[in-house]
Image (tube, rainbow, N blue to C red):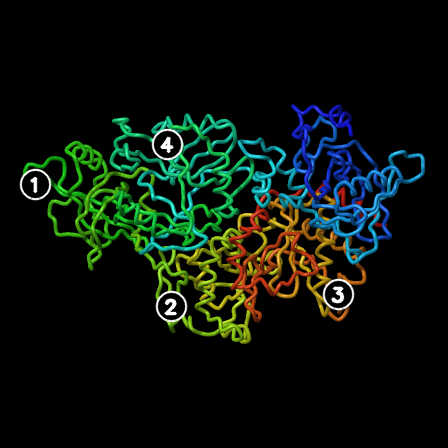
Amino acid sequence: MSLNNYNRKRIFTNSPEPPPLHHNSVVSPFRFVIQKHRATRLHYDLRLEHKGVLKSWAVPRGPALNPESKRFAVMVEDHPLEYRHFEGIIPEGNYGAGEVIIWDEGSFSVNGCKDRKECENYFEKGLQKGHIQFELSGKKLKGLFHLIKTHGKEEKAWLLIKGKDSFSSNRDILLEEQSVRSDMTIGQLKKAANLSLHRVDQTKLVSLLRDAPQKSFSGPLKPMKATLVNTIFDRQGWYFEIKWDGYRAIAECLGGEVKLYSRNGNSFNELFTPVVKELNSLDFDAVFDGEIVIVDENGKSDFGMLQNYRTTGKGILVYYIFDLIYYKGYDLTGLALHSRKEMLQTIFPSNSNHLKYSKHIETNGKALYKAAQEHQLEGVMAKDSAAPYTPGIRSRLWQKVKIVKQQDMIIGGFTEPAGGRKGLGALILGVYDEGKLKYTGHVGSGFSDKMLGDLRHTLEGKKIEACPFFKTPCKDTNATWVKPELVCVVRFSEWTSDGFMRHPVFLGLREDISPEQTIEEKPQSTKKRFTVKSNQTKTKISGHNLILTNTDKIYFPEDKISKGEIIDYYREIYPWILPHLSERPQSLHRFPDGIYGNHFFHKDMEHLPYWVQSEIITDSESLEATKYLLCQDEASLVYMINLGAIEINPWISRRSSQDYPDYMVIDLDPLECPFSDVVHTALEVHSVLNLIGAPNYIKTSGSKGMHIFVPLEAKYSYDQSRQFAMLICHAVNRQLPATTSMERIPSRRRGKVYLDYLQNLKGKTIASVYSLRPHPGAPVSTPLHWEEVTSTLNPKLFTIKTIFKRLGERGDLWRPVLGAGINMSECLHKLGALIYDVK
């Protein structure tokens, strides 16, 4: 059969659609594909393999599972067999311009026959007769179907009808919107339309980006930090990398401009111009995280050579890149590390001299550590492959294990030289502890004569009278005190019992770390749990001392989960939950005696530790001032949980934009009705929001209902948000009057799902994503993909015991909620048209 019409309509140099290939052989079984295609109008293309081509029908309303639903289908030109693999975007100006996804695919047979030749005969007879009877075995569609030619004026008009069998139903199969190849919807594919391929097929890139929000990059970026631990380990689901001994560096390659800078935002552009030049040659926008090092001929990094690079220019300069933070308009921080790594490897330049991908191994940390020891490297990095990227945050999802003890130190003074030495005798060093500079020892070795002279010259300009340490560190009469502004790195053998360095050696000054960040790093245990079950536990978190009380008290009796285990949970979930808590006033729901004890809301936090941030907000009507706690770091989160706050309830606006919520919320609250009604309602809300072009995200409530969020990006007031939510709920209630209600009084809505739009009020709170809820089973409010919202969904499966495995598989599905907001005017215009049509 001819493909002339197919070829005539396409210019293959302008379109990603596949040109026909010559097939010398065929394989069984027959294949089919249904492609969802948004061209001038949205439609579905049914393609059935026959005699080396795909016979094709355009089905405007898509297939149905109900035998009573007759779907109009127009026979179109034959397509090549290769077309069943096509998923992508046909550019403007080309025939059929628009997005195409593979909505369903699989095999089929005709009249139940298994012989290929016999099937083709039946198919050919059906074409001529005007009735093709076939059985699909796809991922979405299964069972008997009929294509019946009509006898009207339309020569190419057919009807697609589902045959009566066990696969027939009234279920709307079109609600399953995702591609069976990439898991993308048409809308998500369009969102990625600006992608140009860099040695990767578009489908794969789009699939990796499906959960990344589009967002303009706002720098400078503060890099994610690792926790120092005491021993190396093997762990499935973890990546292990070499710890490079150099300068941590962020590279912004945006709009044709490169900014290479330190963790403090200090520019490296002039110092490391060869790296900047190669970054500038990249043909895509991206933001990288990595380490700048000088390596010797054996590939070993040398911090001393890096220190002298400005003056000597000697050594092999390398920027080892280990993470991808931003790519072509997409914020990747919420994606799991394994997805970011896969993208980074995919786009990484293969012919660079100064840019290198920092490789990793999976699971076997001990083997890498042993190899690093043999090569006398600094240490090993261990990273949870499910971890998001948390800028500026130190967490246990990234851990470092040092082979050589090394510590950043602040220079607080120096001593005069003795004997024949020139310049200075020793540096007097310290670190910050609870905001005070603590003495850690003297270092007098590791200097060249030139270093001694240069350091003396630099320190002369920083002399002060008073000792900067909170305790005078020594009785040296010849000590000269200096402003604690310079940071150096020191190698030593061990800490003494008094907290001083033994056998210290000066390695060089650091230009990438500020003094305020320089604290003593003490290795923590590599065990996954953090607390010790006892009546009272002292711990240090984020540099702050906390006393955890009654950690052995049981809070979930049926599950035997203690308060200490709840603290453990929140410390582990902290990197995922913090972006959704930071800068938001908190209403603490306290359960000091567990889920069955007395509980109460606590908003006005009169007495807080000095390091816990707060915000005083005055009510515009009562003029009553309330001091709200702000959860800004891990220590603040643990402080809240230690007060018995099992669940976390933040505002939906931030303190800097109190009257402008970051998202609109619709709370689906069932009363004495099956959960299947909640699912049905959620899908209807999803359908309405999709029709008006409003991105929407769903999570379990952790109780009986579900929460649907629409990002607003703090561009609209609470009144606007609430009115918008009310209109959406009215549209849904009109469609589902038997199972939904907008009545606030419970007695008037028994047996129905309450469409609660009144959560969109200033000061109202809703359980945070990843929050525990005070119910048996320790459920967690968990984000979902919309394809998971089916009649088989069981919210009880999302608990404290399952959430981390899910995060490893799915990543942070909730990060896009903090991304780009809707255009409410456009959405309201479409909603008005929709409501009018419903009438």
Ranked by sequence position, the earlier of labels 3 and 1 is 1
Q: Name the residue under label 2.
A: 532
When the figure is inspected, residue 327 is found, relative to residue 765, above or below; the finding is above
Q: Name the residue under label 4.
A: 268
The three-letter amino acid code for the residue at tag 2 is Val
Under circle 1, the secondary element is loop
Under circle 2, the secondary element is loop
Ranked by sequence position, the earlier of labels 1 and 4 is 4
Query: Which image quarter holds the N terminus?
Result: top right
Ranked by sequence position, the earlier of labels 4 and 2 is 4
The disc at residue 418 is 1
What's the CA distance linking mark 1 and mark 2? 50 Å
Few, some or many residues within 10 Å of mark 1 (<14, 14–19, 20+): few
When the figure is inspected, residue 206 is found, relative to residue 522, above or below; the finding is above
> Looking at the image, can residue 426 be seen?
yes
Q: Given contact means CB atoms under 8 Å apart, are the residues at marks 1 and 4 in contact?
A: no
Few, some or many residues within 10 Å of mark 2 (<14, 14–19, 20+): some
The three-letter amino acid code for the residue at tag 4 is Phe
793 relative position to 747: left or right: left
Q: Name the residue under label 3.
A: 752
> Looking at the image, can residue 603 be seen?
no
What's the CA distance linking mark 4 and mark 3? 61 Å
Residue 243 or 107: which is nearer the viewer?
107
